[in-house]
Image (tube, rainbow, N blue to C red):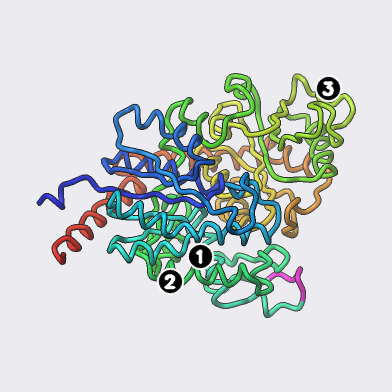
Amino acid sequence: MGSESHQLHIFFFPFMAPGHMIPMIDMAKMFAMRGCKSTLIATPHDEPTFLRSIAKTKDSGFDINVVTVTLPLKDVGLPEDCGSLSKITTMEMRMTFIRAVMMLDRQIELLIEKLAPDCLISDIFLPWTTETAAKFGIPRLVFHGTSAFSMAGTECVRLYQPHKKVSCDSEPFIIPNFPGEITLCRMQMQDFVNEENELTKFVNVMKDSEKTCFGVVMNSFYELEPAYADHYRTFLGIRSWFVGPLSLCNKETEDKAHRGNEASIVQHKCLKWLDSNMTNFNAAQLHEIAVGLEASGQQFIWVVKKDPNAEEGKEEWLPDGYESRIRNKGLIIRGWAPQALILDHEATGGFVTHCGWNSILEAVAAGVPMVTWPVAAEQFYNEKLVTQVLKIGVDIGVKQGVIPFGDSVKSERVEEAVKRVLVGEEAEEIRRRAKALAEMARGAVEEGGSSWSDLGALIQELKSHRLAHTKKI
């Protein structure tokens, strides 16, 4: 009885990138709130962010902690300040960074020996942790920071290779054995899919580790994508639990403000305004966005990456006199913004997003319509889900993935898309659907909801696994 009743202890090991760490921290909080002991694994570079993010949960009496591992950056030839993927600038550096992460295996083993967790939940980018967990007889669960739609879609493309049966990069193809007759073209796919390289091999390793692990935890909820959740579970045969939206574990304003890095603007100033976006666009593209936003006549918040070499208000992309002209219409934030907080504000009517899954799910949870502007990775899949399946957004018209700056978009298209999502009958319909999905999202994580139930079922299954393993010993 002791093994069955004692507290379940789970390790959470995210990949070292903001888009991977933030939902994993939220997941650790959610498990802790359901009675588990949660231990997050961070690097010294990210530890302050982790501690700040969990402080309120810990102070409320829940069992959640952070332990650290040190990346051997010097050993792989990376600068000491490259402690996070956000500091990496080239594909070559990315693969080198992944090699450094793989060298953490011994440190993780020592932590497991010392703290004896019952389960390891780790990022899809850490495939070697399946073998590490197996050494200690504990299950490894994969965390996917994206939708079932994109996971099932990319797997169907990988299995059936429809992109090799078209005559050119722009010719559309239907994803085979996939619900909804969804079309893509080669220009919208990752380079490693179109042409085999080092990353292709790594993705194959990730897929293999997924097949041999205990199962997959998804930051999504069943009602959002039922056909694709079923497809992922049944047609592709992946054991999975849908426990999102994870961001909804942050119920207070303070919790939402403390997710991720320190905000570059005080909360109350943010909440007076409207629309937000963040991606590595070049100066010419930023100029087009500025012109398009002003021409739309709509109120907006615009989040841009801070340029350390430019004086604020005098960046080369900023039209002359721009900030004085838009003073009563718009607000520019240079740096990190409390996105979930902005999206939750009642004045927010639309959101321009690069279609990263965290951003989409935060917008869904807040009931905010989207303008989709995918750049790379699985973002074109996510765009299809938002615009064609859920119909809670409009696309800005991007035709191809271009790393790192995205496909070029003229100011007229920015203006048109912003107006489409905010003004008129189409906008009203989109808003109505978005609000209905937000209600479903909140219901999913409440007691008795689909995600609440899936999380409870997973916790129970892990307890049963621990009991069975204890009996064998």
Q: Where does residue 50 sit, x and y in percent of width and height?
A: 46, 38
In this view of the protein, which residue sits in the foreground, 421 or 132? 132
Q: Is residue 156 left or right of residue 313?
A: left
- Pick out the residue farthest to the front: 75
Q: Residues within 10 Å of mark 1 (few under 14, many from 20)?
A: many
The numbered mark, 2 or 1, whose residue comes first in the sequence reads 1
Q: Secondary structure at mark 3?
A: helix
The numbered mark, 3 or 2, whose residue comes first in the sequence reads 2
Q: Where does residue 379 sit, x and y in percent of width and height?
A: 62, 55
- Look at the image and give the residue range highlighted in magenta: 168-172
Q: Where does residue 39 sit, x and y in percent of width and height?
A: 36, 44
In this view of the protein, which residue sits in the foreground, 80 or 46? 80
Residue 264 vertical placement versus 373 (above, below): above
Give the Cα distance between marks 2 and 1: 9 Å
- Residue ID for mark 3: 325
The residue type indicated by label 1 comes to: Ala
In this view of the protein, which residue sits in the foreground, 147 or 87? 87
Q: Where does residue 91 sit, x and y in percent of width and height?
A: 68, 60
Dots 2 and 1: beta carbons under 8 Å?
Answer: yes
Q: Residue at x 81, y 37 (%)?
A: 292
Q: Quadrant of residue 330?
A: top right
In this view of the protein, which residue sits in the foreground, 2 or 287? 2
The residue type indicated by label 2 comes to: Phe
Q: Residue at x 68, y 66 (%)?
A: 191
Q: Residue at x 40, y 49 (%)?
A: 12
Q: Secondary structure at mark 1?
A: helix
- Residue ID for mark 1: 152
- Residue ID for mark 2: 235
Q: Secondary structure at mark 2?
A: helix
Quadrant including the C terminus: bottom left
